Amino acid sequence: MTSQWVMDEMETADLRDKRLERRLVELLDTLSQASTSSIPAACHDRAEMVAAYRFFDNDKVGFEEVLAPHIDATYE
């Protein structure tokens, strides 16, 4: 189950693809549970790790798009 704070934080995420937005929420939730760990260490298995790296390697996903909802939540 996704943490409520993650859903609140990513409420304004706009990656122009609902699947990517859903993946962003899932990824943030996973990585936040082991915030000082590397991506491979934070992920529960190899498939989740590969999915995380593919997410960040996606041309539709940029630094600004990932950070924008956090900035919005901070202003809120």
Image: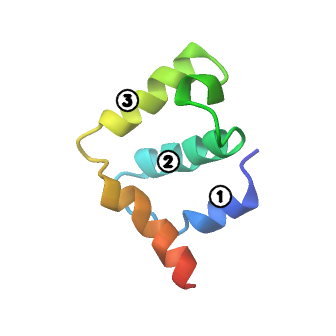
What is the number of the mark on residue 36?
A: none
Does any portion of residue 34 appear in the rendered image? yes
Q: Which residue is mark 1?
A: 6
Sequence-wise, the earlier of marks 2 and 1 is 1
Kindly give the residue lying farthest to the bottom in the view shown.
76
Total numbered labels placed on residues in the image:
3
Drawn side of residue 5 relative to residue 54, left or right:
right
- Mark 3 highlights which residue? 54
Image coords of residue 50 (percent x, y): 46, 21
The residue to which callout 2 is attached is: 24
Secondary structure under tag 3 reads: helix
Secondary structure state at the residue bearing disc 2:
helix
Q: Tag 3: residue type?
A: Arg
Seen at 33% across and 54% down, the residue is: 63
Quick one: label 3 or label 2, which is nearer the N terminus? 2
Does residue 6 sit above or below 20 in this rendering? below
60 over 49 or under it: above or below: below
Quadrant location, the C terminus: bottom right
Q: Quadrant of the N terminus?
A: top right
The residue nearer to you, when weighing 7 against 28, is 28
Of labels 1 and 3, earlier in sequence is: 1
Q: Mark 1 falls on what kind of element?
A: helix
The residue at the point 69 percent across, 38 percent down is 34
Q: CA distance from mark 1 to mark 3?
A: 20 Å
Three-letter code for the amino acid on which mark 2 is drawn:
Leu
Mark 2 surroundings within 10 Å by alpha-carbon count, few (fewer than 14), some (14 through 19), many (20 or more): many
